[in-house]
Image (cartoon, coloured by chain):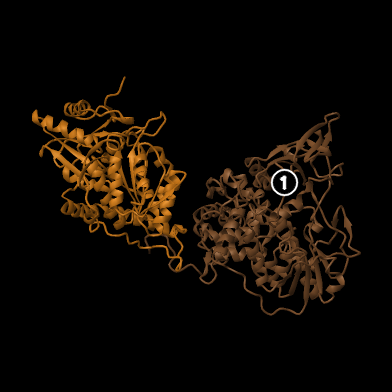
Chain colours: A brown, B orange
Amino acid sequence: MPDISISLGYMDWNKTGTWRTQRPFYEDKTPPCSAACPVGNDIVRFIQKITQEDFEGAWHLIKEENPFPGICGRVCFHPCESKCNRASYDEPIAIHALERFVSDFASNLNKRIEKIPDVREEKIAIIGSGPAGMSCAYHLAKLHYDVTVFESSSLAGGMLRTGIPSYRLPKDVLDREISNIEALGVKIQTGIPFGENLELEDLKDYRAIFIATGAHRSRGLHIPGEKGKGVFNGLDFLRKVNLSKKVILGDKIAIIGGGNTAIDVARSVIRLGKKATLLYRRSKEEMPAFEDEIVEAIEEGVKIRYLVNPIRIQQKDSLQRLECLRMELGEKDESGRRKPVPIPHSNFSIETDGVIIAAGEEIEISFLPKGMERERGIVLTQRDGSTGIKGIFAGGDLTSNQRTVAHAIGSGKKAALAIDCYLKGKDSEEAIHQILIGEGPSLSIFRHLHPEERPMNPHVVTFEELNMDYFEPLKRHKEFKGLVKERIKRFGEVTSAFTTSIALEEAERCFSCGTCNECENCYVFCPDASIIKTEENLSHQVDYDFCKGCGICFSECPRGAISLKEEAR
Amino acid sequence: MKRVITGNQAVAYGVILSRVDVISAYPITPQTTIVEELSELIASGRLNTRFLKVESEHSAMAALIGASTGGVRCFTATSSHGLAYMHEMLHWASGARLPIVMVNVNRAIGPPWNIWSDQSDSLSQRDTGWIQLYCENNQEVLDTILQAYRIAESVKLPVMVVLDAFVLSHTSEPVEIPTMEEVDPFLLPFCPEYPIDIQEPMAYSMIATPEYFLEFRYKIQKAMEKVPEVAQKVDDEFRSRFGRGYGAIERYGEEKAEILLMTSGTVTSTSRVVIQKLIGEGVSIAGIKIKRFRPFPSKEIFEEIKGAKKLAVIDRNLSAGVGGIFAQELRATLYSREERPQVFGFISGLGGRDITPELIEEAIQYTAEHPRPEEEILWLGLKK
């Protein structure tokens, strides 16, 4: 008889798993960042790669969904960060800065996605080489299609090239990411304006067409004097500056508008050595421009006058006299913002050397094929980008009022998927449904290409579902910004990339919501030694022969990557 | 190397030299500085030991029961209410035959609230199947920890090493600290008999039906009965390696004395001074220090009390309704003997009150003047 009450033989015959009433299982769920990303980036996984110091792996992961990490890391308005669960704890992860870090790392090593072999016979035409068109081209090329992009301007890039100043997006970053798309086998023909040198009939050989011509027309103010000399529109101004064309400007410039274009114009004016005053008809809270950029503009000396609306522009010699009305905020309008209402008899005048109107953009409709439905200033499409015309798809700013680079990239990707389905005779709605991230609208094309890999429960992980016992407060790292007095002298990039050590620290802050990062908490806590780690597959598995279903792994998982369900009887 | 250190530091040195694998503890005055010292050493990387933070003493002992079952050397320390909170797990540790070593810094149990020295905490746990060793000074504290692992791992029973609150725990004395090289050959790595191996899983501490339970308890008693011999061997080897030994009890003073003063813990040091003084004055008196309380050193005591007529026992504890616990144990063990000296049971120093030379002398004087005690409990220094 032994000294202690111990079994006389091994106990592995006793499958204690039969006692289980609930079953834990590993199940990745949707992190809120990815669900909020219009591009559909696999954010948590690329951050995990950073923590493993596999920066190239991180870059490949991003590139699966997004041809433009260098661009998005710089100019995206990062809705991912607004939804980051870490914001409920201390501060959100600086996702955009990590994406930029990864992209800079790859470009420093001259990393490229290799040319796609086995090109299919079907040719596809893309009109417009902006973020939507190029994203569509990129994903179609990866789906082995023969893609040609037609661009009216002499250089590819669309609004990325003509609309975004180089202090936010250096041209070499844009050139690099576009040339990488070309390297896949995508052909780009520049200097071919659609509707002029190129008609729909010329594209008969193409089995599908994606139109993403953007919104390049400045919206007018419809006030007297706006067509006068010394009055420019914002997009024309930016196009000239961004294509390094000569711009003649007076010393004091008034910019009308409160969106990102207005801010870009104002900061460009400052860099040309002039004074910039922004006139906006609502207050700061309603301003559609992104907060960070407003802050940077003010740092650089841009003056902003709120609740002011010009009603007349009068020219006096080289001077412009802007007659304005003061405004106050009324009820909310359909955009959800409070509507500006003129205060009677509040007229006053502003003297200035030039006026630039940046009060919004419109789409060009003159060259659109007949039969394309439009509503509220945009082309109407189905969720997959299909128009009413067979084989013709549309996307980007042309089809959406959410005019961001990220939305454009996302719409191009969705159209690529739809075109693939269309040419293969598949139901694109069904295909989209399979690969939605969370409830959508963005989707994962990786999962379209590899349906068996990385399954993900659409449930978006909430802060309450995480176990905060395993995290401690850590400050968000900020990117270094150049000194204002240096910034305003030139169009060089304002923001510097994270150093490797800072990127690693910032990546470590990620909760990795809903995504197992092999922290091994389950392995350590399991009282039945029933978490198995296999050599060939590093991910964990539950040994159901012995798991009693206590649920400790489920409750101690810091990131909600384990689910628990009632055992079927 | 000789250093001037507190009793709690002596504990920490003992633990370091014992190459303990896992420590789990919850802080309580006056034990706190032991775990503070050890946890800082571990945090700074100087001590390669796993420290498990827990939310209670019950969990501390439970954690060590797991670790010790896994086959590693374990340590914890506590006091007073903390020890009481561990009670259930103390039974488990001995029932599962785990050689855990624990330091208990003797402290009164409230209310009234009190943090000072008193043996009621450790003596309340006398029936939990733990070996109990009481220390007189800081050197003995360090040495006893090294010996405790040898004894525990040899008989597969847990050991409680006990020292007085503040009088030892927070008071500095010169202590000879052996080197690791000296201790290693004395205390070899722990070789568990039934270690957990998840490749060959066994069921542990499973049910024992009435057909078997009695036998498991019998084995624990047999293990306890082996302790005197094992402890003697360990002490002898310790003495030959380090030049210091303690025995289960120690007799000092007049060889043929008819009155013996029995003490445990730091009261012994004071008693040594008093007895030396009285002998100088011509009184025939000797002292007996009781180091080992469990298993109770009956045989050793019988040897040393031959010829004695009266035993004065000073208890720094009280089992209300009976009296001092050492006196009670002594009476019980003497009952079967032909030669039964009178037992004078004194209670003194509860809740950390000083047991002064005057009080000790008063106890000896009372014993000398009375043929038998007038009362079961004789209170020393009681305010009327």
The residue under label 1 is A249
| Image position of B38 (left or right of A326) | left
Residue A156, placed above or below residue A360: below
Q: Quadrant of the N terminus of chain A?
A: bottom left
Residue A548 shows in this picture: no
Residue at (61, 62) in percent of width and height: A25
Q: Amino acid at mark 1?
A: Leu
User: Dot 1: few (<14), some (14–19), or many (≥20) neighbours within 10 Å?
Assistant: some
Tell which residue pokes out farthest to the top in this image.
Answer: B384
Residue A289, placed above or below residue B98: above
Q: Position of residue B342 (x, y in %)?
A: 21, 35
| Chain ID at mark 1 | A
Q: Quadrant of the C terminus of chain A?
A: bottom right
Residue A365 shows in this picture: yes
Residue A36, placed above or below residue A543: above
Residue at (42, 57) in percent of width and height: B213
Residue B273, placed above or below residue A232: above
Q: Nearer the viewer, residue A98 or A435?
A: A98
Q: Quadrant of residue A36?
A: bottom right
Q: Quadrant of residue A370?
A: bottom right
Residue at (80, 74) in percent of width and height: A423
